[in-house]
Image: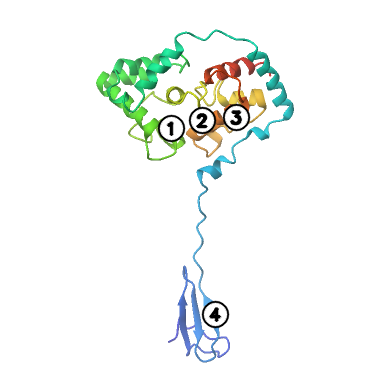
Amino acid sequence: MAIDLLECGNCLTDEHVELAERLTGTQKKLKCTNCGDEWLRGEPARQARSSPTLDEIKKRFPKPGDVDPVKLARVDELKADFLRREPEPVPNVAPYWKKYQWVFSAEGLPTADPQDLKNFANSSVGANPGNMSVFNEAWNEMGTEVAAAQVRRTIEYLLRGTSPSALEDRLTALINDATPNAMRGFKESLLTKVLCIAYPEEYLTILMYTGVAGKREIARSLWGLELPAPESTTWTKGRLILWSNNLLRALLGDGFRHQQHAAEFLWWAKDRA
């Protein structure tokens, strides 16, 4: 059977050309039954490049090993100086943290008092989330019950959502209003504060990635690390927020009473480095 009028290079005729095998894309293997010669015709399918995994992407984020040893030594000096001081703990932080750990728990959140949820958004105890005028306007427009229900959905999705499975990506979806679980005005600083309370051993009480004293500015000031600007990278906001938190914690090391104490050191040291 002749295929596309292709001639055999040896026999100079297509009379004995047959399809031997159909390959990927438009590529086929042809065979001349007269002389036994075989050859390829067409283009193979292009191999799709697999997307990098989250762990592979994370490996490209700055690491403690990227810091100049001189800067590391200077921060260690500041840390030793800071830890020699024993500031009195703020008395109302511990009970506030304990109360909201229950409020945000799987058991406590469904019946959380709406006033407690609104108060949390406007409280500076333990960490100041900044101006909450957008949130308060949204709350008033929606009404107490509807707004409280939406805040509960936001917090539940952040802490225990499964789609997507990565916390970084759920955080991004809430910040970007890319999920129906998002609440207007309940964005980066409040979402980060929820994480600080729910996981007090893991998150520094520095509520913004970038700003006057955000994680990015602190990393640059203390350790000379240039973290990506959100507007100039393909890394999502949630990834920048969580990865910078983990980087700062790794650089800080041990010796602090809790993450708030560590954050106090960062604010104190950033202008002394």
User: Marks 2/1: CA distance?
Assistant: 9 Å
Which residue is tagged 4?
39
Give me the disc on residue 241: 2
Q: Is residue 121 left or right of residue 13?
A: left
User: Marks 2/4: CA distance?
Assistant: 55 Å
Q: Give SS at disc 4.
A: strand
Residue beneath the point at 32% across and 23% down: 108
Which residue is tagged 1?
171
- Front: mark 4 or 3: 3
Residue 124 visible, this orientation: no
- Pointer 3 local density, CA inside 10 Å: few below 14, some 14–19, many at least 20: few
Pick whichever of labels 2 and 3 is earlier in the sequence. Answer: 2
The answer to which image quadrant residue 73 occupies is: top right
Residue 263 visible, this orientation: yes
- In which quadrant will I find the N terminus? bottom left
Q: Is residue 4 left or right of residue 114?
A: right
Q: Disc 2 residue type?
A: Ile
User: Marks 2/3: CA distance?
Assistant: 15 Å
Q: Give SS at disc 3.
A: helix
